[in-house]
Image (cartoon, rainbow, N blue to C red):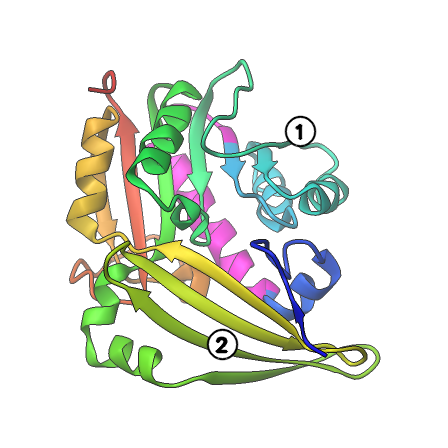
Amino acid sequence: MTTVLPPSNFLHDRPDLYDRVIPEAGDAALSRFARDMVLAHAPGRTVLDVGCGLGRELAALRAGGLAADGLDASPAMVAAARAASPGSRVWTGSMTGFELGQTFAAVLCLGSTFLYNHTVADIRATLAAFHRHLQPDGLLVLEMRNAAHFLTPEGQRLLRHERADDVPLDRGHLRYTTRLEIDPATQLLDRYYTWQPPTGPPVVEHLRHRLLFPQELAAHLDRAGFTVLDMFDDPAPALGRYAGPGPVSRTLTGRRLHVLARRTGAAS
């Protein structure tokens, strides 16, 4: 018998498995990237990481001299983040409407978390929440899957081939397959996972990401009271490719999209 999950996130509700499936190397590079961007462009060192997950970035940012706090929608992840970064305040909440009663020099939203905003209304609500929680001239750092990549031959291959992975655990293996499809009418990327734990039935999961093209995202940011400072696709710290500040690629066809934006005015 196969277990079919309601809309949720298999890994985000199981921090122990997330820790095995999502390698820490990518998060370490992402932490270095985020720290460098904050130090170079933010008006201070207070940071809110929206979608903070296990708290790896929170711990690394604090170790790097930043006052980093977090927000996540998963209570299991909030508990893990508090354990990983005891000096951080970590709240449970939705990015579309959180109210913390304070502002930060920088807001981070990494690892495609922003793409769980499936509708235009969701996108506007989330950007408004980011705007409310940023100081004047505060920095917004977004890192996500790049919709434009699916227009390339490599991106097209991702849509044609199912991927199979095998993750060693302390006892047995976690095997899973990933299949991607695009729904053009909703501009959503459907992600179908079949998870086979070492014991028990397979678990089938369907998750969705909103696909945002670079200029589409820039228009949303402008409407929300942000000025885009930079957009680039490489280096890609989430893929482990980040050695520090240096030249960037702005072809915007790579797998990841990175956006630096400043809060400069009121939302229109």
Residue at 26 percent across and 52 percent down: it is: 212
Identify residue for label 1.
89
Toward the viewer: 236 or 176?
Answer: 176
Q: Quadrant of residue 222?
A: top left
At label 2, counting other C-alpha atoms closer than 10 Å, the crowd grade (few under 14, some 14-19, many 20 or more) is some
Q: Is residue 178 left or right of residue 149?
A: right
Percent across and percent down for residue 225 are: 24, 24
Q: Is residue 199 left or right of residue 221?
A: right
Q: Mostly what secondary structure, the magenta segment?
A: helix
Q: Amino acid at mark 1?
A: Arg
Percent across and percent down for residue 50 are: 51, 38
Q: Quadrant of residue 174?
A: bottom right
Q: Quadrant of the N terminus?
A: bottom right
The segment highlighted magenta reads 24-47
Element carrying mark 1: loop
Residue 27 counted in the magenta span: yes
- The earlier-in-sequence mark between 2 and 1 is 1
Residue at 73 percent across and 77 percent down: it is: 197
Q: Quadrant of the C terminus?
A: top left
Residue 16 counted in the magenta span: no
Residue at 20 percent across and 28 percent down: it is: 223
Identify residue for label 2.
178
Q: Is residue 48 left or right of residue 201?
A: left
Toward the viewer: 185 or 82?
Answer: 185
Percent across and percent down for residue 7 are: 56, 54
Toward the viewer: 207 or 253?
Answer: 207
Q: Quadrant of residue 162?
A: bottom left
Q: Amino acid at mark 2?
A: Thr
Label 2 to label 1, Cα distance in Å?
34 Å
Element carrying mark 2: strand
Q: Is residue 244 left or right of residue 73?
A: left
Residue 240 in view: no
